[in-house]
Structures are given as structure tokens and as C-alpha cells.
Image (tube, rainbow, N blue to C red):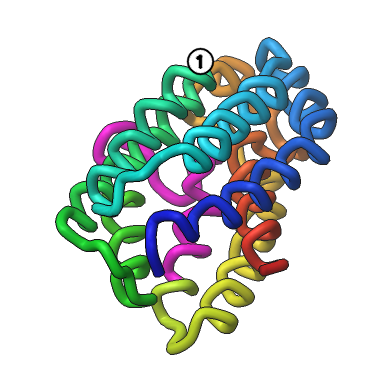
Amino acid sequence: MKTKDCVAYFKKIHEEIHLNSAKLVELDQAFGDGDLGISMDQGFLAIYQFSQICDEEDFGKYFLQVSKVFNESAPSSLGTIISFGFMGMAKSMKGITDAKLSDFQIALKKGLENIKEKTNSKVGDKTIIDSLEPAIDAFADANDKVDALNNAFIASEKGMTNTSDLIAVHGRASYHKEKTLGHIDGGAYVSYVIFKALCND
């Protein structure tokens, strides 16, 4: 896979995020300022547009630029968190111009590690990690792309759904403590939407 092949993937992700932007606004309004759908829509649109004109062949340099584009275009705490993920992927894929499934399996793990290190979050904290970590673990355990994406989607959906049984420990929602029970975490829902889009490849 070449960097130019990422255009189609980011197109799918943006389309799915756009379709779910109203749902993300609704989820965010419960304990946040309600702009999650707007910032994620803007961020993934910016990556898609950037990827269309980017001629960088090194995946490391490409994802480093993607990280910057997303952070600037999705000004929010989740925007910064996701950009940490792209940053971790960039470090892992430095020098790679023709990526294999195994390269992405390693890179996603590194991206997840970077997010967890920067945010001090873990599964059970009611954040994007609750959907992202099981999805990336499932992706890493597969032997081909189709299984990897399908398994990641299933795991992300389960993780996202489980956040309704958790109490928020990070971010603005954490101030509401027990009141967050019964509510899906917006970040976890973004992770679910991303893997849903990729699963439709």
C-alpha cells in the first residue's frame, strides 16, 4: 500500500463521520459543549483534502503531516488526542513507502501507546480508549486485511457500547461522575464510526 491509497480510506472515514455528526453533537451535549460532531467532521474532511494533494511517499512523514492537519482542523481535546495517535503511527512508519498489513498493525499499536502515554487513560475510564484499544488489538491479531478490519469493527462497537456502563474519569464529563452512567462516550463513538467506515472497504 502507498500513501496515495490513504485517500480512499480517509474519504470513507469522513463520509461516515459526516453522517454521524448529529449523533456526535447529541452525545457531546450531555456533558460537553456539543461541538464534537462539528470538530470531527472538520478534522477528517481536512485530512481527506490534504491527502488528495499530498505527494509525500514516506508514511512516517505523511502521518506526521496528517497529525498536524487534524490537530489544527479539529480544535478540541479529542482532536488533540487523535493527533497523538497519528503521531505515534508516524514514528512507527518512518522510512516505509510500501506498507504491508503488519506495518499498520504495529503502527496502530504505537499510535495507541502514544495516546495512552499522553493522556494517562486506560480501558474502563470511559474514553475513546474503551473502543480504540480492543479494536486495535483485534486488528493486530488478524492475518489478512478483511479479517483485521471486520474484527476491529466488531471490537470497537462492543467497546463503545460498554461505555454506557462506566463512570467518566477524564475530561469534562468526569465532573458529572455517576450522572455519566447510561451514556455512551462521544470519543468511543468516534472510534466506532472510524472502524465502521473502514470495515465497509
In the image, 81 versus 129, the foreground residue is 81
Who's the residue at 74% across and 46% down the image?
16
Residue 39 within the magenta-colored segment of the rendering: no
Tell me if mark 1 has few (under 14), some (14-19) or many (20+) residues whose alpha carbon lies within 10 angstroms of its own.
some
Who's the residue at 36% across and 66% down the image?
104
Who's the residue at 45% across and 55% down the image?
4
Is residue 88 shown above or below 152?
above
Q: Would residue 153 appear left or right of 200 to someone viewing this image?
A: left
* Stretch in magenta: 115-137
* Residue 116 visible here: no
Residue 130 within the magenta-colored segment of the rendering: yes
x, y percentage for residue 96? 21, 62
Is residue 71 shown above or below 52?
above
* Residue 29 visible here: yes
Q: Secondary structure at mark 1?
A: loop
Is residue 153 shown above or below 40?
below
x, y percentage for residue 8? 60, 56
| Residue on which the image places disc 1 | 75
Looking at the rendered image, the quarter that the N terminus falls into is: bottom left
x, y percentage for residue 144? 48, 86
The three-letter amino acid code for the residue at tag 1 is Pro
x, y percentage for residue 199? 66, 68
In the image, 106 versus 59, the foreground residue is 59
- Quadrant of res 40: top right
- Quadrant of res 93: bottom left
Looking at the rendered image, the quarter that the C terminus falls into is: bottom right
In the image, 123 versus 39, the foreground residue is 39
In the image, 92 versus 29, the foreground residue is 92
Q: Would residue 120 appear left or right of 25 to someone viewing this image?
A: left
Q: Main secondary structure of the magenta part?
A: helix
Is residue 123 shown above or below 35?
below
Who's the residue at 62% across and 32% down the image?
45
